[in-house]
């Protein structure tokens, strides 16, 4: 019996095809999974980059708010007491409250008990209405210190348009307002100086005009004296008074014109006692009209000083005139005491003491500043000019209230080195 062998060539080919097909399929799956994984990795990287950018933006915004000079805060208006949920460092510094004293507390507690209740109500009304609020207001720090605050609060809305929070910005404008006030005061001083300059021109012209009739009065009086020589003694006496007062008035006018002239000071050796006596003679008529008594106390043999006679007389006249004004409504004795004494080896001190109303303590620091005056019709220049004159002479001018009543103005002036 013949046995024949079966052919086995087809089965390996089939298996190979199956294997190849499976391999191709698996490779396709692997490629697809690799592509999907690559895409997911890209998405993750993009997400990480976006998150990093978002975190950087949040960090920049936070740093910017923390670095801002203005006080920035955020309040939650969904709660009845409007708690603060954010406050930058400038807000903490401006209000004087620490961070833990602000966060979680009601916003209006930071205004203090002295805040204007009307403004507080205006802010609350704007918040309840969902409106913007803008106003400059007086605020108080934790320690009670005042400052001017420019406040702006703006609503923050959710996606549905409802107000959930308010962001506020406040600026301390105290220094700015002080500078503006200083500029306004300087502008007013400049206008005042202009007016005073015009007044000086007018007074100089007036002095010139007055000098002419005074000269005529003097001439007529002296002519009448010659006509009535050795006759009418009473009339002669009256004429002598007229001549004396005329000459005194002419001297005052001459000194006034000298004061208004733009000329350099004439520094000469002066006897301060004699200078004061001359000044008292000039103002004696005014003292009589005001029912005031002027007394003097001079140290004997005071050394000479070097100065401008007209300018120093201007200072003494101004101090005496101020004392007259201070005693205007005095019920008691109206007395001015002028002292001249040796302060030390190199200086003489002159004091003008009155029995008037004294000077309010709040006015003393600004008494010698330009244009400060407590008089309704005053220019506020006398004491300022007087201090400048004394300082130009190397001395000092000051004032103090007397223990009983009235005030004492006093100035020092150096003695001449050759006569010390």
Image (cartoon, grey):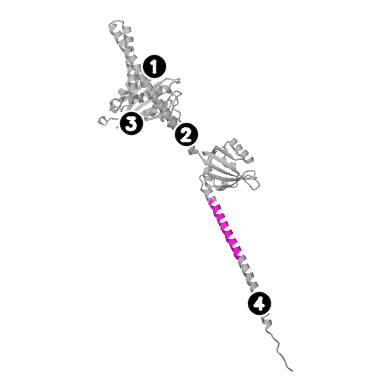
Q: Does 107 sit above or below residue 409?
A: below
Mark 3, residue position: 392
Q: Quadrant of residue 169?
A: top right
Residue at the image point whose x is 46% and y is 36% from the top: 179
Is the Cβ of the residue at disc 2 closer than 8 Å to that at disc 1? no
Answer few, some or many: residues within 10 Å of disc 1's Cα (few below 14, many 20 plus, some between 14 and 19). few
In the depicted view, which residue is nearer to us: 97 or 179?
A: 179
- Overall secondary structure of the magenta section: helix
- The stretch of residues the image draws in magenta is 37-60
Q: Is residue 64 visible?
A: yes
Q: Nearer the viewer, mark 2 or mark 1?
A: 2
Q: Position of residue 137 (x, y in %)?
A: 55, 37
C-alpha distance separating marks 3 and 4: 118 Å
Whichever of callouts 3 and 4 sits on the residue coming sooner in the sequence is: 4
In the depicted view, which residue is nearer to us: 407 or 4?
A: 4
Q: Nearer the viewer, mark 4 or mark 2?
A: 4
Residue farthest to the bottom, as pictured? 1
Q: Position of residue 188 (x, y in %)?
A: 44, 30
In the depicted view, which residue is nearer to us: 205 or 310?
A: 205
Residue at the image point whose x is 66% and y is 75% from the top: 21
Q: Nearer the viewer, mark 2 or mark 3?
A: 2
Residue 173 lies left or right of residue 155; in this view the side is left
C-alpha distance separating marks 1 and 3: 33 Å
Whichever of callouts 1 and 3 sits on the residue coming sooner in the sequence is: 1
Mark 1, residue position: 288
Q: Quadrant of residue 22?
A: bottom right
Mark 4, residue position: 19
Residue at the image point whose x is 47% and y is 36% from the top: 178
C-alpha distance separating marks 4 and 1: 140 Å
Whichever of callouts 4 and 2 sits on the residue coming sooner in the sequence is: 4
Answer few, some or many: residues within 10 Å of disc 2's Cα (few below 14, many 20 plus, some between 14 and 19). few
Residue farthest to the right, as pictured? 1
């Amino acid at each position: 019996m013949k046995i024949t062998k079966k052919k086995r060539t087809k089965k390996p080919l089939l298996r190979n095809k199956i294997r190849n097909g499976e391999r191709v399929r698996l490779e396709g799956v692997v490629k697809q999974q690799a592509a999907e994984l690559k895409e997911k990795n890209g998405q993750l990287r993009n997400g990480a980059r976006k998150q990093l950018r978002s975190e950087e933006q949040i960090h920049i915004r936070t740093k910017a708010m923390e670095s801002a000079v203005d006080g920035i805060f955020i309040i939650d208006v969904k709660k009845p007491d409007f708690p603060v949920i954010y406050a930058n460092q400038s807000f903490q510094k401006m209000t004087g409250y620490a961070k833990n004293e602000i966060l979680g507390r009601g916003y209006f507690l930071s205004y203090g008990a002295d805040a204007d209740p009307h403004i507080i109500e205006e802010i609350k009304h704007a918040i309840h209405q969902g409106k913007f609020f803008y106003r400059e207001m007086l605020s108080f720090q934790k320690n009670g210190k005042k400052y001017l605050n420019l406040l702006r609060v703006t609503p923050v809305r959710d996606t549905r348009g409802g107000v959930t929070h308010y962001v506020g910005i406040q600026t301390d404008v105290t220094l700015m307002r002080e500078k503006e006030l200083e500029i306004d005061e300087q502008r007013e001083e400049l206008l005042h100086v202009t007016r005073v300059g015009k007044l000086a021109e007018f007074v100089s012209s007036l002095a010139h005009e007055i000098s002419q009739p005074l000269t005529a009065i003097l001439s007529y009086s002296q002519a009448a004296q010659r006509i009535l020589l050795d006759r009418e003694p009473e009339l002669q006496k009256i004429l002598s008074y007229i001549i004396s007062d005329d000459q005194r008035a002419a001297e005052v006018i001459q000194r006034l014109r000298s004061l208004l002239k733009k000329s350099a000071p004439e520094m000469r050796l002066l006897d301060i006692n004699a200078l004061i006596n001359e000044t008292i003679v000039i103002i004696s008529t005014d003292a009589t009209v005001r029912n005031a008594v002027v007394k003097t106390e001079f140290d004997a043999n005071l050394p000479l000083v070097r100065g401008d006679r007209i300018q120093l007389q201007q200072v003494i006249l101004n101090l005496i005139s101020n004392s007259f004004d201070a005693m205007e409504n005095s019920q008691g004795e109206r007395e001015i005491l002028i002292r001249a004494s040796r302060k030390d080896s190199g200086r003489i001190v002159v004091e003008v003491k009155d029995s008037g109303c004294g000077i309010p303590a709040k006015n003393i620091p600004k008494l010698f500043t330009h244009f400060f005056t407590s008089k309704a019709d005053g220019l506020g220049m006398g004491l300022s000019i007087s201090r400048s004159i004394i300082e130009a002479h190397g001395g000092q001018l000051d004032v103090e209230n007397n223990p009983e009543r009235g005030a004492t103005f006093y100035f020092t002036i150096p003695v001449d080195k050759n006569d010390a």
